[in-house]
Image (spheres, rainbow, N blue to C red):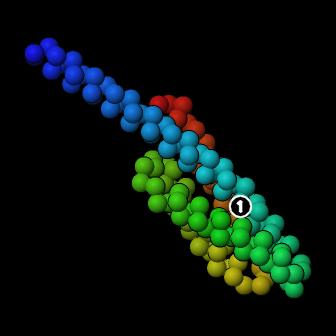
Amino acid sequence: MNKLYTITVVLFLTSTLFVNASTYDQKRSELINLVSKQLSLAKKVSSNYVNFQNDLKNNQKRQIMLTSIQDFHSNHLKLIQNRNHTKPIKSHLDEVDRIWIIAHELSKEKKHPKMITSTMNDIHKELQEIRKLYKKNIANN
C-alpha cells in the first residue's frame, strides 16, 4: 500500500512538472510570435502613417493607418500584461511602453511623420532585443 502511494505521488509530481514545463515553453513561443508581429507592425505603423500624411484626404490610407496603430497597441497591451518577464525583458518593455505613449499621442495628429518614424524605429530596436531575450530564455530552459 505504501509503495503504491509513493509511486502514485511520484507519477503525479512528474506529470505536473512536465505539463508546467511544456506550458511555460508554449507561452514563451507565443510571446516570441507576438514580439515578431510587433516588429512587423512597428514598421507598418511608420510607413502607413507617412503614406496617409502624403494623402490626407484618402480615407482608405487613413483606415489602414488606424488599423495598424490599433493592432500595435492591442498587442503591446498583451505583452506588458504578461507577468512572467525577466528583469531585462521588463526593462525593454518599459522602454517600449514609454516610447509608444509618445508615438501613440503623436499619431493622433496630422503631422510629425519624421517623429513617428523615429519613435517607431526606436521601438523596433527595443523589440529586437526583447525577441533575442525570449529566444535565449527558451534555449536555456
Closer-to-camera residue (118/103):
103
The residue under the point 42% across, 49% down is 84
Q: Position of residue 117 (x, y in %)?
A: 77, 68
Q: Quadrant of residue 16?
A: top left
Judge from the rendering whether residue 36 lies leftward or rightward of residue 44; answer left or right. Answer: left
Tell me where residue 67 appears, x and y as whole percent.
Answer: 71, 70
Query: What residue is at 34 percent from the left and 31 percent from the top?
Result: 17
Of the pair 1 and 60, the residue shown nearer to us = 1
74 up-or-down from 11: above or below: below
**Residue 11 place in picture, x, y as percent:** 28, 22
Question: Can residue 133 be seen from the camera position used here?
Answer: no
Residue 29 falls left or right of residue 68: left
Q: Hey, what amino acid is under mark 1? A: Ala
Q: Residues within 10 Å of mark 1 (few under 14, many from 20)?
A: many
- Say if 59 sits above or below 114 in the image: below
Q: Is residue 59 shown to the viewer in this render? A: yes
- Name the spot of residue 137 as percent of width and height, x first: 51, 37
Compared to 68, does 5 lie above or below? above
Question: Is 45 left, or right, of 74 in this rendering?
Answer: right
Q: Is residue 21 left or right of residue 5?
A: right
Q: Residue at x 10, y 15 (%)?
A: 1
Q: Give the residue number, with chain letter if any, for mark 1.
A: 42
Q: Is residue 133 above or below residue 141?
A: below
- The foreground one among 56 and 88 is 56
User: What residue do we see at 58% from left, 38% from top?
Assistant: 135
Image mark count: 1
Closest to the observer, 86 or 69? 69
Name, please, the residue furthest toward the left. 1
Q: Secondary structure at mark 1?
A: helix
